[in-house]
Image (cartoon, rainbow, N blue to C red):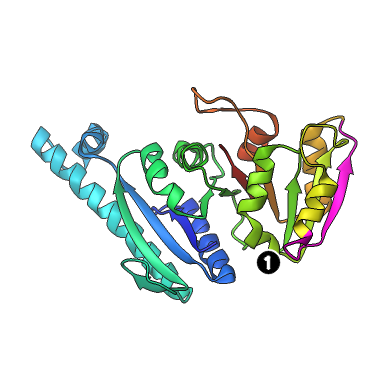
Amino acid sequence: MKVLMSPVSDRPESRTALKVTLGLADLLGANVVGCHLRPSRDKRKEYPARKLFLMGGSDQQSLDELARKTTKSASARARGLFEQMAGEAGFTLVRRPRINLEKGAIWQEKVGTPDRIMAIAGPMSDLIVVSRTASKGKVDRMFMLAALLHSGRPVLIMPPGKNGIPGKRIAIAWNQSPEAARVVSACMPLLQAAEKVQIISAGRDNQLGPKSSQLAAYLIHYGIKAERIMTQGHDESTELTASFRETGSDLVLMGAYSRARVRELVFGGMTELMLRKSSIPVVMQHH
């Protein structure tokens, strides 16, 4: 992993995600891209008119100007946060990547929707880091889903109140699927840096796909010795989440599975549980 990306705004969850991004990049010798989303001109016009009026706006021209200034101010605060945190973490601020650059911090501002930006900028990263809020926030979920559905890259989702650097004890939620295999392959540098790796599967390996023993053998090629744990398989979600806690895992790797790609917001079973309620950081990848 050489490029870690995090959406940046002046919000508490953004600070958490950025701290984790910088910590993992330091561990991996990677560069960091901070990506700030600016709304398009049409979207700026949707800025709440009442709020703008209370800020002193009256006619449409004034409202448009206040919306522009508000957007510019938000961008400046986000950039200031990124540059401050990157500098404190020992990263070098650069405008563009260079050959043999390590611990470089690159700032980007993009105009558009989260879906559009993640489809364009997301694939040009090796890992995207986002953070959930304690409340049921729409903004953090919007970025989280956009990253999962449109980047094709692994997405690290930090739960509320967690800002430690995860990855010392990694659990692989294994179900023999191509999605699970892809996230393992994409996160190999994290697995190689971990102190302990465990493969946890719900019930017997009776699906079409590699068994957990075959995954363990595959990981040995990369110098990773993984322990295998198999639950009874009666209640997948309950058993897996209990195993994550009992093993002291601080990071879970799993594939993301959606029931309805067209709706783009409907995930099922274990995926939705981990997206909404997990107290453990999780890396998911969706195709």
Split into 4 quadrants, where in the image is the C terminus? top right
For label 1, the residue is 193
Split into 4 quadrants, where in the image is the N terminus? bottom right
Q: Quadrant of residue 59?
A: top left
Q: Is residue 125 left or right of residue 190?
A: left
Q: Which residues are magenta?
A: 220-233
Q: Is residue 62 left or right of residue 263?
A: left
Residue type marked 1: Ala
Q: Which residue, as the protein is rendered here, is positioned at the far right?
A: 232
**Residue 75 in view:** yes
Q: Is residue 32 left or right of residue 177?
A: left
Q: Is residue 124 left or right of residue 130?
A: left
Give x and y (percent) for residue 62. 11, 40
**Above-or-below relation of 269 to 10:** above
Give x and y (percent) for residue 239. 83, 38
**Above-or-below relation of 188 to 264:** below
Q: Is residue 222 magenta?
A: yes
